[in-house]
C-alpha cells in the first residue's frame, strides 16, 4: 500500500509573514524570470529591486534589455529574493513572488513615487534613472512561496505581503519629509533603530523608506529592516512611534551601562 504523501507546506503564521516581508523589504536585487516572447522559454536576469510603500517590488530596467521586452509582451513574471550567506546556500531563506508587471507612465504620480522610493534605496541609479530608455515597472504580487530553510516551506497570498487602505496614500504624502528630517537631525535615533530593532551592527545608517509596518535603513551597500512594535493604523502615528522606539532602545543601552 502506498503511504500518503507528506505535506511539506507548513501553515502560514505571523513569523513566516514577518520573514517574507523582511526578505521583500530588505532586498537590493533579485532574479527576475520572464517568458521569452520569441520562443516561450523562461528567461532569468538579475535586476535591482526596491519596494513601493504597500510592499510591491519595483524594478528600473532598460528598454534595450531582453527581459523588458518580455514583460511588455507578457506581464507574467516571477521574482526570487534572498541572499545566501556562509555555508550551504540552500539553508538560507528565500522568497519567490508570482507577479503581474506594469510599466509606470513617466510623469504620473505613481511613477514619481516609485522613482523616489527606488532612488532612496538605490542612490547610484540616479546616474541612469532619467535616461529615456529606462522605465520603472511595478511587480504586483499575486502569491508567493517562502522557503525559510530546510523543512520550512510556506505559501503566502497577496494580503500576506501588501498593505492596503488609506494609510498607503497618507504615508506617501508624508514619507519624504519624514525621511529628510530623520536623516538630517536624528542620526542617533536611526542608529538605535538599526542596533536594537533590526539587530545589526555598523555605523552610518540612514532611513531609505517608511511604510505601515516598519522602516528600511541603508548604510552604503548594506540594507536592513526595522519593524515597528505594531503596524501603523494611520500616518499621523509615525512620529510618536519613532520617538517611543528611540526611547525604548536608549533605555536598554542605559540599563546595560549601569550593570
Image (cartoon, rainbow, N blue to C red):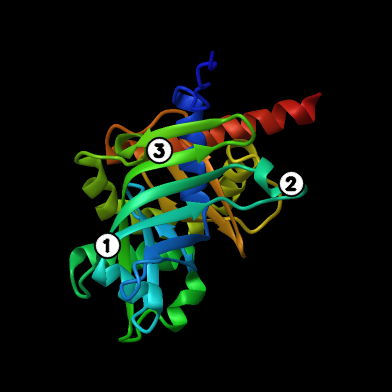
Name the one closer to the observer, 61 or 108: 61
Q: Locate residue 143, reporting x and y percent.
A: 34, 41
Separation of residues labelled 1 and 2 (CA atoms) = 33 Å
- In this view of the protein, which residue sits in the foreground, 133 or 247? 133
Residue 131 position within the rendered picture, expressed as x and y whole percent measured from the top left: 35, 86
User: Mark 2 against mark 3, which lies toward the viewer?
Assistant: 2
The residue that appears at 60% across and 45% down in the rendered structure is 194
Q: Position of residue 53 (x, y in %)?
A: 33, 50
Say which mark, if any, is on residue 75.
1
Where residue 88 is drawn, which disc sits there? Answer: 2
For label 2, the crowd category at 10 Å Cα-Cα, with few meaning under 14, some 14 to 19 and many 20 or more, is few
Q: Alpha-carbon distance for marks 3 and 1? A: 28 Å
| Disc with the residue nearer the chain's start (1 vs 2) | 1
Distance from disc 2 to disc 3, alpha carbons, whole Å, reads 31 Å
Q: Is residue 58 above or below residue 191?
A: below
SS state under label 2: loop
Depth check: 157 or 54 in front?
157
First in residue order: circle 3 vs circle 1:
1
Q: Quadrant of the N terminus?
A: top right
Write the residue at 36% across / 34% down: 160
Q: Which residue is under mark 3?
A: 213
Q: Which of the 4 quarters of the picture holds residue 230?
A: top left
Q: Is residue 125 left or right of residue 237?
A: right
Q: Which mark is residue 209?
A: none
Residue at image coords 44%, 62%: 32
Which residue extends farthest front?
A: 1
Quick one: SS at disc 3? loop
Instruction: Report whether residue 50 is seen.
Output: yes
Q: Position of residue 150 (x, y in %)?
A: 64, 34
Q: What residue is drawn where x is 45% and y is 25%?
A: 14
Amino acid at each position: 500500500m502506498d503511504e500518503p504523501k507528506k505535506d511539506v507546506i507548513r501553515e502560514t503564521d505571523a513569523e513566516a509573514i514577518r520573514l517574507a516581508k523582511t526578505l521583500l523589504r530588505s532586498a537590493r536585487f533579485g532574479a527576475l524570470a520572464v517568458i521569452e516572447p520569441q520562443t516561450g522559454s523562461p528567461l532569468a536576469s538579475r535586476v535591482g529591486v526596491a519596494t513601493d510603500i504597500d510592499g510591491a517590488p519595483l524594478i528600473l530596467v532598460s528598454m534595450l534589455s531582453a527581459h523588458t521586452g518580455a514583460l511588455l509582451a507578457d506581464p507574467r513574471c516571477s521574482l526570487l529574493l534572498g541572499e545566501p550567506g556562509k555555508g550551504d546556500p540552500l539553508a538560507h531563506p528565500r522568497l519567490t513572488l508570482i507577479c503581474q508587471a506594469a510599466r509606470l507612465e513617466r510623469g504620473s504620480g505613481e511613477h514619481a513615487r516609485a522613482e523616489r522610493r527606488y532612488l532612496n534605496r538605490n542612490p547610484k541609479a540616479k546616474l541612469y534613472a532619467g535616461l529615456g530608455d529606462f522605465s520603472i515597472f511595478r511587480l504586483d504580487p499575486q502569491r508567493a512561496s517562502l522557503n525559510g530553510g530546510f523543512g520550512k516551506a510556506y505559501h503566502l497570498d497577496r494580503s500576506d505581503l501588501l498593505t492596503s487602505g488609506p494609510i498607503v496614500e497618507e504615508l506617501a504624502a508624508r514619507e519624504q519629509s519624514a525621511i529628510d528630517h530623520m536623516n538630517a537631525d536624528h542620526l542617533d535615533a536611526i542608529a538605535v533603530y538599526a542596533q536594537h530593532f533590526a539587530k545589526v551592527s555598523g555605523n552610518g545608517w540612514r532611513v531609505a523608506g517608511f511604510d505601515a509596518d516598519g522602516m528600511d535603513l541603508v548604510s552604503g551597500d548594506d540594507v536592513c529592516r526595522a519593524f515597528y512594535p505594531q503596524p501603523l493604523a494611520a500616518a499621523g502615528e509615525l512620529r510618536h512611534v519613532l520617538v517611543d522606539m528611540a526611547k525604548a532602545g536608549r533605555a536598554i543601552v542605559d540599563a546595560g551601562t549601569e550593570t
